[in-house]
Amino acid sequence: MSLRSKERRGNVAWRSPSNIALIKYWGKYGDQLPQNPSISLTLKNSFTQTRVSYYPKDVQGELSFSFQFQKKSHPGFYDRIRKYLHRVKSYFPFLEDYHLDIESENSFPHSAGIASSASAFSALVLALETIENLVHDGGHEMDLTRVSEIARLGSGSACRSLFPIAALWGKTPESETSSDLHAIPMESQLHDIFKSFHDSILIVSQASKKVSSTAGHSLMRNHPFSKVRYEEARRNLKEMLEALRLGDVERVGFITEMEAMQLHALMLCSNPNFILLQPNTLKIIERLKDFRLTTGIPVYFTLDAGPNVHILYPDEYRTHVQNLIVDQLLGYCDNAQWIQDSIGEGPMKLE
Ligand code: DP6
C-alpha cells in the first residue's frame, strides 16, 4: 500500500505536565538509567503543549522535521530533538516515511529549574506514539509503559510525567513492578490528602541555568559521596512510600526537604563544584521555616536543579500559605513571579 496518499497526513497534539520529585534522581548509568529510584508528584498547570503535523515525504529514510518553540525557531532545542529522534527511530518506524512539523509551547519559563524537559519529552513522545498507532497499527490503546520508556531516553524525569498524581521510577524491592527502564503509576499507593496538595512555585530567577541537569548527573560519576547518596536515597524512598501511604504529611515533608538539601549539597561538593541556589532561595526557605514553626501549618519546600522554590501544602491551608507567599515571599522573586500549581491528572490529548 502506498504511504503517499492524502489521508495519510494529519496532526496530533498533547498537553503533558511537569513533575516535582520528592525523592530525587541525581546520577545515572548505562542508557539513561537511574542510580536510585525516585518518586514525583505530577503537576497540573506547568505543562508543555506539542502539536505534530505529519505527511509523507518524498525521499524515504532520512529524518525530516521542523521545530518551533513558542512560535519561533530554536536551534538548541532543534538539535536536541534531532539527536533524540535518531536515537528512538527504531520505536517509530513511521519516521522513515513521514516529515514532521513540531510546534511546542510551555506554560512556564524553560531552563529555570522547573522540569521543562520532563513535560517537553513526555508530550513529544505521546504525539509520536499516537501517530505511530494511527499510521501503522490502526489505533490500538496507548501503552504507557512503552511511552514512559521512550520518554526516559529523552530526559530521565520525563518518564514520570505520564501518570496521574504520582509516579515511581527505578527498581526498588518496595515495588515488584518497578523498573529502571520506565516509571509506574503510584496514585493507588497515596493517601488522599496528597491528591489535594498544592505546589506554589516561586520563581527566584528565570534565567537559564549555568549547569544543565545532564551535566550535573555526570558529575555524580566521580563524586566522593555518590555511594552514600544512593544508599540514602533508597532509605528515604522506603520511608517516603510508607508515609505517603499512611498520609503522614509531616514525615513526607521532612524527607522531601532533606532530599532537596542533599541534591544541592551534592552540587556544592562536586568536582568542579557549582551553585544553583541563590541568596533569595535561602531567604524564602528561612521565612517558610519560621512560618511553619510559629503557625504549626504543615508547609514544606523542595527544589529542583535550579534556584526556584516549590512550596508544598495541603488544600486545607491554601489561604494561609498563599497569603504568606503574597505578603512576604514575592519580594524575593524575579518580578514577583510565581506559579500556582497543584497535583494533576497527567497528560491530556488535545483536539
Ligand atoms: C534534580 O531528568 O532533567 O530534577 O535525564 O539528564 O534529562 P536528564 O536529567 P533530568 O534530571 C532531573 C533532576 C532533578 C531531580 C528529579 O527530577 O528527580
Image (tube, rainbow, N blue to C red):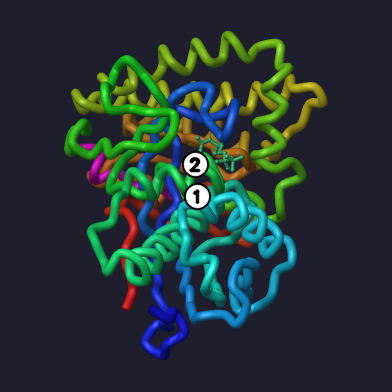
Question: Relative to residue 118, is residue 78 drawn left or right?
Answer: right
Q: Amino acid at mark 2?
A: Ser
Looking at this view, is 70 or 61 the one in front? Answer: 61
| Residue 108 pos. (x, y %) | 53, 62
Residue at image coords 45%, 68%: 49
Disc 2 Cβ-to-ligand 1 distance below 8 Å: yes
Q: Is residue 272 above or below residue 330?
A: above
* Residue 303 picture quarter: top right
What is the spatial separation of the Cα atoms under label 1 and label 2, in whole angstroms? 5 Å
Q: Residues within 10 Å of mark 2 (few under 14, many from 20)?
A: many
| Residue 96 pos. (x, y %) | 54, 66
Q: In this rendering, does residue 68 appear at all?
A: no
Quadrant, the C terminus: bottom left
Q: Amino acid at mark 1?
A: Ala
Which numbered dot is residue 93? none
Residue at image coords 23%, 58%: 141
Disc 1 Cβ-to-ligand 1 distance below 8 Å: yes
Q: What residue did someone put label 2 on?
A: 157
Q: Which residues are the magenta region?
A: 193-200
Q: Is residue 121 above or below residue 213?
A: below
Which numbered dot is residue 118? 1
> Is label 1 in contact with label 2 (beta carbons under 8 Å)?
yes
Residue at image coords 36%, 67%: 136
Q: Is residue 181 above or below residue 347?
A: above
Q: Is residue 192 above or below residue 335?
A: above
In the structure shown, which secondary structural element does the residue marked by tag 2 occupy? helix
| Residue 63 pos. (x, y %) | 63, 67
Quadrant, the N terminus: bottom left
Sequence-first tag of 1 and 2: 1
